Structure formats: structure tokens, C-alpha cells
Amino acid sequence: MDSITLITSFGTFLLGAASAGFISYITSRNKEAGKIDAIDEKLEKVVSQQKSLTIVTEKIKSDVDIKNWISKENRILRREKIELLYSKLEELYFHRGVYIFEREQENAFLFHRLVTDIKVIIELYFNHDNEFDSDLDEFFKIYEETVEIASITCEEEKEKAAILFMERYKIPHLILIKKIQGLMRDELEES
């Protein structure tokens, strides 16, 4: 073997080794690029899932905030209606006597309006579970009896009937007032 053949063989060997190394490098680089691409894909997926999770979390938080706000507003409204109902019942207690003894149109209108207002407030805001049904029944019996007594024409007979009636009426009135006070107490304890 002469030196040229040896150099050529060595050159071919080096060229083959360099080519193998280059091919190995390219293959290794492609594998690493593939791993990096796979990691990038997974990272994008995780970021996308995190965004979705954040959106859902914010929506839930917003819904809870809205429900809390609505609940708070409803409690405020309920307290206002409890106060209104209480004051109308007390006003009615006074005007019932005025209605019985002074049959002027203005007194009759006020009496009937108060009765209607009280019924509406109870029906709209407090009778969802029918806990006031017996109270409303009693309330309307008293209302009807008030109208009957007010229609008596003999003043002496009207006075006797009214005195007896007003004594009987105190207890149902106080029961309803106590029930409304209990509602307010419960409202205040829950806040």
C-alpha cells in the first residue's frame, strides 16, 4: 500500500466518520426538536386549560357575587316590608275604631285601603310557605265583623258591639304583631 492509497483510505474513513457524525447530529437534533415541539404543544395545552379554568372560576365567582348581592337586596326589601306591614297594622288598629264610629267617606276609604295594603304585603312578601294563612283568615273575619259593626245604625247598639269587638280583636292583633316582630328579629339575627 502506498501512501496515496493510505491517505485516500484515511480520507474516506474520515469523510465517512464525519458523515456518520453529521447524520447522527442531525438525527439527534431532530429528536431534540421533536421533544421541544412536544413540550411546546403540552405547554400550549396547559396554558389553554389554565385560561379556560380561570374563565370558569371568574364566572363562578361572579355568579356567587351576583347571588350574594341579590340575597342582600332581598333581605333589605324584606326588612322594609316588615316595617311597612307593622306600621300599617298599627295604623289600621287606630283607624278601625274611627271607621266604626265616624262613617265619613274618607275614613271608610282609608280603612279599606289599609286592609288591602296589609293583605297585599302579606301575600307578596311573607306567605310563600302559607305560614300566614290562619292569620289572614282571622284578619278577614275581623275585617268583615268591623264592616258589620260599622253598618249598625243604632248608636247605642253599635257602641256595645264595638266595645266587645275591640276587646276580642286585641288578641289576634297582638298575635299578628308578635309574629311580625319575630320575623324582624329573625332577619336581624341572620345578618
Image (tube, rainbow, N blue to C red):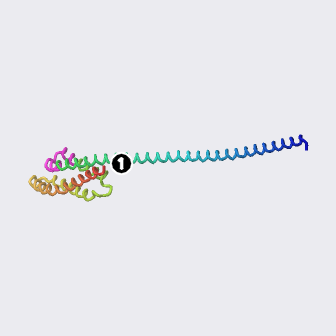
Highlighted range, magenta = 95-111
The residue carrying pointer 1 sits among few (fewer than 14), some (14 to 19) or many (20 or more) residues within 10 Å by Cα, namely: few
Q: Quadrant of the N terminus?
A: top right
Q: Which of 179 and 133 is in front in this view?
A: 179
| Rendered location of residue 71, percent (x, y) | 36, 48
Based on the picture, tell me whether residue 108 belongs to the magenta stretch: yes
Residue 71 in the figure: left or right of residue 165:
right
What residue lies at 24% left-to-right and 55% top-to-bottom?
Answer: 179
Q: Looking at the magenta stretch, what is its main secondary structure?
A: helix
Amino acid, disc 1: Ser
Q: Name the residue under label 1.
A: 71
Residue visible at 25% across and 59% down in the picture: 134
Q: Where is residue 15 in the image (x, y as percent from the top left)?
A: 81, 42
Given residues 191 and 122, the one toward you in this image is: 191
Q: Please tell me whether mark 1 sits on a helix, a strand or a loop.
A: helix
Residue 45: x, y in percent?
A: 58, 47
Q: In this view, does 119 lie to the left or right of 62?
A: left
Query: Does residue 119 appear to the left or right of 150 in the view shown?
Result: right
